[in-house]
Image (spheres, rainbow, N blue to C red):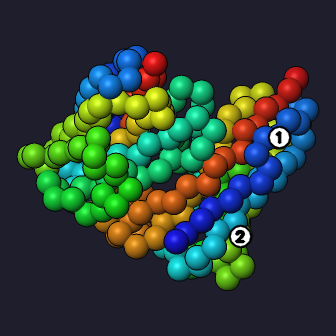
Amino acid sequence: KQEVTQIPAALSVPEGENLVLNCSFTDSAIYNLQWFRQDPGKGLTSLLLIQSSQREQTSGRLNASLDKSSGRSTLYIAASQPGDSATYLCAVTGGGNKLTFGTGTQLKVEL
Amino acid sequence: EAGVAQSPRYKIIEKRQSVAFWCNPISGHATLYWYQQILGQGPKLLIQFQNNGVVDDSQLPKDRFSAERLKGVDSTLKIQPAKLEDSAVYLCASSSGSTGANVLTFGAGSRLTVL
């Protein structure tokens, strides 16, 4: 059974800092890994998707890496802004397009 | 393209009452998912439909939860009777297929509070 763990559970940083969110998964037989953002009371927004054959994906200030063999992914956020405050969820896709989510990292970027 | 529509956005009921949630996926998306997200946790898959057939309902508490997608488009998720621990956000998502390459699009969710 796939298990996804995210560390840390919560993070508070001053504006402008670069930060790293971590995700680990137990079963390396995945199709892809996604990072989502969730704002309070809202649904999930997909930020980055890394296929199992890829090592990283970049979008603006966000960079996600994937090391499938070790079961790890990181989400790097450069020059953080208060608008980045949200919960970030990592999810891996297994057979049948089934997503298994981590419990998320709650990020707060302070002025 | 229009996103995944869900209603109601919020619902408050007392335990042992029933509730139903509705989802309209993106047009043409064959696969539809219902997820349950309890506060402080990641979403958990309840049921996955491919067109109007069930692909995976292994984590659906079938004694109280039911879901249908009769015409392969809209779907409803019902809880009867509700328990306190059913308080959660119910997320609907859809994708164009069921392979690992298909990206899911999520709706805004329906927040249930059971008193």
Q: CA distance from mark 2 to mark 1?
A: 19 Å
User: Total marks drawn?
Assistant: 2
Which image quadrant: the C terminus of chain A?
top right
- x and y percentages locating residue B16 in the rendered image: 32, 25
Closer to the camera, A14 or B44? B44
Residue A82, by quadrant, is top right
Is B20 situated left or right of A57 in this image? left
Count neighbours of disc 2 (C-alpha within 10 A) and say few if under 14, some if 14 to 19, many if 20 or more: some
Given the image, what chain letter belongs to the residue carrying mark 1?
A
Residue B93 is at least partly visible in this image? no
Q: What residue lies at 54% left-to-right and 64% top-to-bottom?
A: A92
The kind of secondary structure element at disc 2 is strand
Residue A6 is at least partly visible in this image? yes
Q: What residue lies at 34% left-to-right and 61% top-to-bottom?
A: B58
Instruction: Say yes or no: labels 2 and 1 on the same chain.
Output: yes
Q: Is residue B110 above or below residue B69?
A: above
Mark 1: amino acid: Leu
Mark seen at residue A72: 2
Proximity of marks 2 and 1: CB atoms separated by less than 8 Å: no
- x and y percentages locating residue A96 in the rendered image: 35, 69
- x and y percentages locating residue B76 in the rendered image: 22, 37
Count neighbours of disc 1 (C-alpha within 10 A) and say few if under 14, some if 14 to 19, many if 20 or more: some
Closer to the camera, A32 or B57? B57
Q: Is residue B55 above or below residue B14?
A: below
Q: What residue lies at 26% left-to-right and 33% top-to-bottom?
A: B80
Quickly name the residue at label 1: A11
Label 2 vs 1, first from the N-terminus? 1
The kind of secondary structure element at disc 1 is strand
Q: What residue lies at 65% left-to-right and 77% top-to-bottom?
A: A68
Mark 2: amino acid: Arg
